[in-house]
Image (spheres, helix red, strand yellow):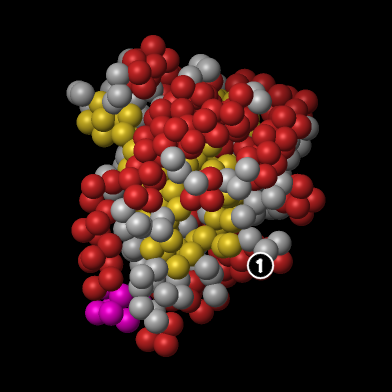
Amino acid sequence: MAEQLPIRILILDDDPFILKLLTRMLANLGFSSVDCSEDGTNALKLLDNVATRPDLILLDLNMPGMDGIEFVRHLVERGYSGSLILVSGEDERMLKTTEKLVQAHKIPILGYLQKPVQPEALRMQLMKMASSLSGQNKKENVPKIYDAEIIKKAITTGELVNYYQPKVRVKTGEVAGVETLVRWHHPVDGVIYPGQFIGVAEQCGLIDLLTETVLKQAFAQAGIWQKLGCDLKVAVNVSMDNLASLDFQDTVVKLATEAGVLPGRIVLEITESQLMGDERISLEILTRLRLKRFHLSIDDFGTGHSSLAQLRDIPFDELKIDQGFVHRASEDETLRAIYDASLALAKQLDMEAVAEGVEDREDWELLRQTGCDLAQGNFIASPMLAEELGAWVKKWRDRIGAEALVSLSEGRVQ
Ligand code: C2E
Ligand code: CA
Ligand code: CA
């Protein structure tokens, strides 16, 4: 999905959980060439090898053994010419002082990130890197950033196209619904993924217009499936910025009514890390939409820091375990612990659990063993155009039997 970028990033942090989380956030932003290190000595080895030398280091300040400041000294000795982002749970004053210290050593520092790291803050820092690289020969390696005017034109001229990715029941293989994932069919640059334009749309006040366009298409499609007798739930991603105004719920209700779609067939997905802003308006909108029988889903679960109380406050129907804690969870203890905890929480709070990023048979088997309700990921199907869904359903039904994906006693797919 995300572009493969040759920019090499090294994350140095003694906490394996933070390493996983940051790797996942970077992958979401299109940076896939990432090395992790839990200690400075090992990181220096990567630095000394031409093949693994990073262009950017995300550096934790507080580490047992060699701490961040000592590590910077080693960078200076080695004449490190890449960039640096400091990451720490220390207060801002401490981070600023350290930033000055690093700058004094003439190491190009992009800035600092405070823990818990927010995906948006990371994105802003990386955008700084993109602009500092402009003019250099690495420019083409950085995802293209589109400006607000161009994005607005794309929205209004119908260049945004909805793709749909199936969600299936793990027990029976039944196709339960689809998630709408928007793509930009750019006339010159080809298919552009949401990572390259949603953030700008949010910052430039275009997200309401964008979401409305996506909702309109998705509801029209849901109406078509409803008429065909396909019992599919259609999920749409909602940005927290959409929940800043009370008009949002009226828009959703109006669009669903116009398309003749029952609210119970619509799922609104809200990302966990965005939810933490906790505005009263958003809570009110979500509660009212739930009262109108729209379904609510908490997305990317595990990447935010929601408390039990917050989860109870908002009546979610579904919890989506972030793909970073699903793929390979059967072989990695840390991932498995987070996956298990998320699943248990969903059950306790009476929500349906969806595992995202199911990429292979091992992931699928873990879901079966642990009793996860729903699965989504490339092992089942990649996002596709609406007209491709019928043919995929046929193939999926064949695969269930041929590959013994569900036990026979669980019955057939509907
Ligand atoms: P998300 O909601 O977590 O969506 C899942 C992402 O994982 C999608 O990326 C999907 O294509 C990708 N994916 C699906 N299966 C697999 C798999 O097996 N392995 C891996 N590694 N990835 C998989 P995509 O389409 O690039 O979307 C990225 C994010 O952009 C979405 O994350 C969502 O937060 C946001 N987004 C997408 N469409 C919209 C939209 O219409 N409005 C808003 N506000 N955000 C959107
Ligand atoms: Ca989603
Ligand atoms: Ca997700």
The quadrant of the image that shows the N terminus is top left
Residue displayed at 26% across by 30% down? 185
How many neighbours does mark 1 have within 10 angstroms: few (below 14), some (14-19), or many (20 or more)?
Answer: some
- Left or right: residue 272 versus residue 27 is right
* Residue at x 57% of width, y 62% of height: 353
The amino acid sitting under disc 1 is Lys
Q: Quadrant of residue 239?
A: top right
Does 80 lie within the magenta span?
Answer: no
Residue 234 drawn above or below residue 143: below
> With 17 as the anchor, is 53 left or right in this view?
left
Q: Which of 147 and 144 is in front in this view?
A: 147
- In the figure, residue 364 lies in which quadrant? bottom left
**Residue that label 1 marks:** 347
Q: In this view, does 72 lie above or below 107?
A: below
- The stretch in magenta equals 399-405
How far across and down, in percent of the image, does residue 121 sit? 59, 30
Residue 413 position, x and y percent, is 35, 73
Of residues 304 and 316, the one nearer the viewer is: 316
Outermost residue toward the top in this view: 149
Residue 322, compared with residue 268, is above or below; it is below
Residue 265 percent location from the top left of the image: 49, 50
